[in-house]
Image: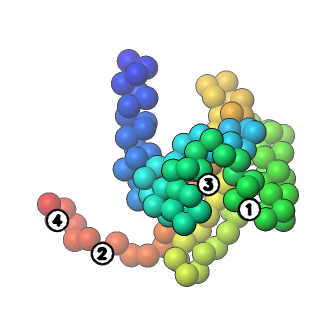
């Protein structure tokens, strides 16, 4: 059953059209979905796996990452922070806490929410 859930959760991440980059508490990139690999291909794409997220950001951004992770650690209810508005791609970006079953912080990820209207027709299969 656990392996089946792993496959299901992994599939959810793999199918998401928005980039998803998961990091552990040492800021190591531990997972990138295909959309993230494509989005960050000019920065190394899949080669970023195992690298520090902080190597991809300037010092000021790294200070903000540390601040948000510190806030996540303060309380189990601190789980989502709005971090960026990308007007070029019409999306909002958030940092989201990753927690285990007990609520302990185990990492974080960046969530992209696009604001463009869908261009697909309903149930166009």
Please, what secondary structure does the residue beneath circle 2 have? loop
User: Crowding at label 3, few (<14), some or many (≥20) Cα neighbours within 10 Å?
Assistant: some
Q: Position of residue 62 (x, y in %)?
A: 80, 57
Q: Position of residue 29 (x, y in %)?
A: 63, 45
Please, what secondary structure does the residue beneath circle 4 have? loop
Identify the disc placed on residue 89: none
Pick whichever of labels 2 and 1 is earlier in the sequence: 1
* Residue 50 in which image quadrant: top right
Cα gap from disc 4 to disc 3, whole angstroms: 30 Å
Outermost residue on the bottom side: it is: 88
Pick whichever of labels 1 and 3 is earlier in the sequence: 1
Cα gap from disc 1 to disc 4, whole angstroms: 40 Å
Pick whichever of labels 2 and 3 is earlier in the sequence: 3
Q: Position of residue 68 (x, y in %)?
A: 79, 52
Q: Nearer the viewer, mark 2 or mark 3?
A: 3
Identify the disc placed on residue 119: 2
Q: Nearer the viewer, residue 74 or 90?
A: 90
Cα gap from disc 2 to disc 3, whole angstroms: 24 Å
- In the image, what residue occupies the spot 84% across and 53% down? 67
Label 4: which residue? 124
Identify the disc placed on residue 57: 1
Question: Looking at the picture, does residue 78 appear above or below residue 120?
Answer: above
Label 3: which residue? 110
Pick whichever of labels 1 and 4 is earlier in the sequence: 1
- In the image, what residue occupies the spot 69% across and 33% down? 106
């Amino acid at each position: 059953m656990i392996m089946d859930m792993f496959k299901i959760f992994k599939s959810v991440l793999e199918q998401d059209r928005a980039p998803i980059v998961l990091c552990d508490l040492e800021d190591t990139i531990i997972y990138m979905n295909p959309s993230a690999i494509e989005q960050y291909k000019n920065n190394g794409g899949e080669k970023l796996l195992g690298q520090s997220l902080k190597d991809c950001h300037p010092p000021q951004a790294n200070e903000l990452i540390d601040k948000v992770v510190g806030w996540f650690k303060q309380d189990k209810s601190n789980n989502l922070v709005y971090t960026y508005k990308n007007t070029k791609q019409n999306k909002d970006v958030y940092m989201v806490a990753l927690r285990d079953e007990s609520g302990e912080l185990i990492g974080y990820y960046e969530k992209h929410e696009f604001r463009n209207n869908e261009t697909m027709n309903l149930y166009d299969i």
